[in-house]
Image (cartoon, helix red, strand yellow):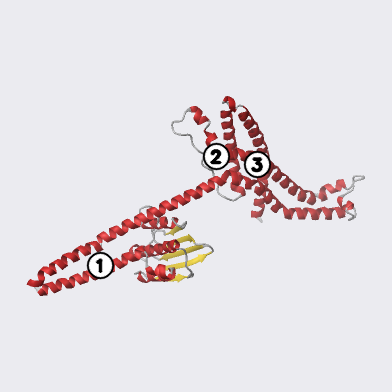
Amino acid sequence: MRSLTRRVLLDTRYTLVGFPTAVIGFALMIAGFSAGVGTVVVWIGLPILAGVLMLARSFADGERGWLSDVLKRPPVRPRYKPAPAGAGRFRRLINPLTSGQSWLDLLHGIVNFPMAIIAFVLTVVFWAIPIAGLTYPLYGLVTSQIPGNTELPELLGLGGGYGVNVIFYGAIGIAGLILLPFMTRAAALVRSGLGRALLTGVAELQERIDDLAEGRAAAVSAEAAALRKLERDIHDGPQQRLVSLAMELSRAQRQMQKDPDAARATIGDAISATRETLDELRALSRGIAPPILSDRGLAPALAAVAGRCTVPVDLDVQTVERFQPAVENAIYFVCAETLTNVAKHSRAQSCSVQLVRTGDTLMLIIGDDGIGGAHVAKGHGLAGLADRLRAVDGELVVQSPDGGPTLIVAEVPCG
């Protein structure tokens, strides 16, 4: 009830208090725009138009503040095109003329006027109905005594008298009170819809473009980091083992004629080294893209990852459907890397992995009872996972206080 009352009061404030502001803004912008257009041929009109656009910007900033309350959204302010570096005084003066958003601000200041009138009238009428109806017992004592006064119930054939009037107007007042939240909301949305389209629509689109660009950059960064890590692991592991293997086989070849027993021992060592190298290459290949993921999906792939972890893992996969390859790869790598970190750094005794779909969101939840201290700061392993998730519009949330426990949640859109 309290939230509903607050909503009605916020919407009413927006339509009533904003109405005179819309009237003043409309008058100033129409007058200034007319003067600027009329004198543009003698150049003085350009600074006037620039001033009108700056005035429209100030009114637009005020409207954006109102929109934040009405639409229950964080305030969004578009980026206005700055003047070029090294521009002269006159060029900086007329710079608002080159910004498309400035003209949208002006358009809003003009078109908002009729919308503000509609919203104002709707709000006043639907506040007046319950107030007039429910307070009739007070003022009706006077109006019912006026000679020749005919009340509405009598005109409708419902009878006359003070008691009938109280019931009739009371019923209208209660009906108006029930409709008040809906009509004030509708009045506020009539006006705020225009404001959102003209004043924040471009900004929201720009934010979306920036998010996509950031996601692409994050994907490139994550892939580059993964390639550097793979290159380093191959150089430090299998490559060195293969060099050592080649040297062992060369030594065995030289020993074959002189000391066959030593040659056999050297070959045995080389075979052992070959097995170790193959095991290491298999481990590296699992970090690239396991065939089980593409062939059978997330559930078997996560089961394989959990089975290799040195910490006992309680796996709970609540969805077995297939998703887009990018989504499956992102979830798999987050799980694989996180379980690797758990085994290496957490000192945990147990770990849990849960995969669940909620609506259009796929959630991977990993928890352990270790010492905590994990975070996504740059330079740490989880930062690369966050970048990988951003590439698919996902998000990584880490709760890992010092002393533990740790909870890591990866959310990826999958609709």
Looking at the image, residue 345 sits to the left or right of residue 194; the answer is left
Marks 3 and 2 in Cβ contact (< 8 Å): no
- Nearest-to-viewer mark from 3 and 2: 2
User: Is residue 329 at least partly visible in the picture?
Assistant: yes
- Please provide percent x and percent y for residue 321: 48, 69
Instruction: Say few, some or many: other residues with alpha carbon within 10 Å of mark 1 (under 14 / 14 to 19 / 20 or more).
Output: some
Residue, x 62% and y 41% (percent of image)? 108
Read off the residue under disc 1.
277
Q: How far apart are marks 3 and 1 (CA)?
A: 72 Å
Residue 66 found in image quarter: top right
Read off the residue under disc 2.
100
Marks 3 and 1 in Cβ contact (< 8 Å): no
- Please provide percent x and percent y for residue 371: 37, 62
Q: Distance between the residues labelled 3 and 2?
A: 18 Å
Examine the rendered structure and indicate whether residue 208 appears above or below residue 270.
Answer: above
- Please provide percent x and percent y for residue 186: 68, 51
Instruction: Check disc 2 and give the amino acid type.
Output: Gly
Looking at the image, residue 391 sits to the left or right of residue 358; the answer is left
Q: Residue lying farthest top? A: 42
Read off the residue under disc 3.
112
- Assign a secondary structure to mark 3: helix
- Please provide percent x and percent y for residue 339: 37, 65
Q: Which numbered disc flags the more N-terminal residue, 3 or 2?
A: 2
Instruction: Check disc 1 and give the amino acid type.
Output: Thr
- Nearest-to-viewer mark from 2 and 1: 2
Examine the rendered structure and indicate whether residue 154 appears above or below residue 319.
Answer: above
- Assign a secondary structure to mark 2: helix
Residue 51 found in image quarter: top right
Residue, x 22% and y 62% (percent of image)? 240
| Foreground of the two, 53 or 192 | 53
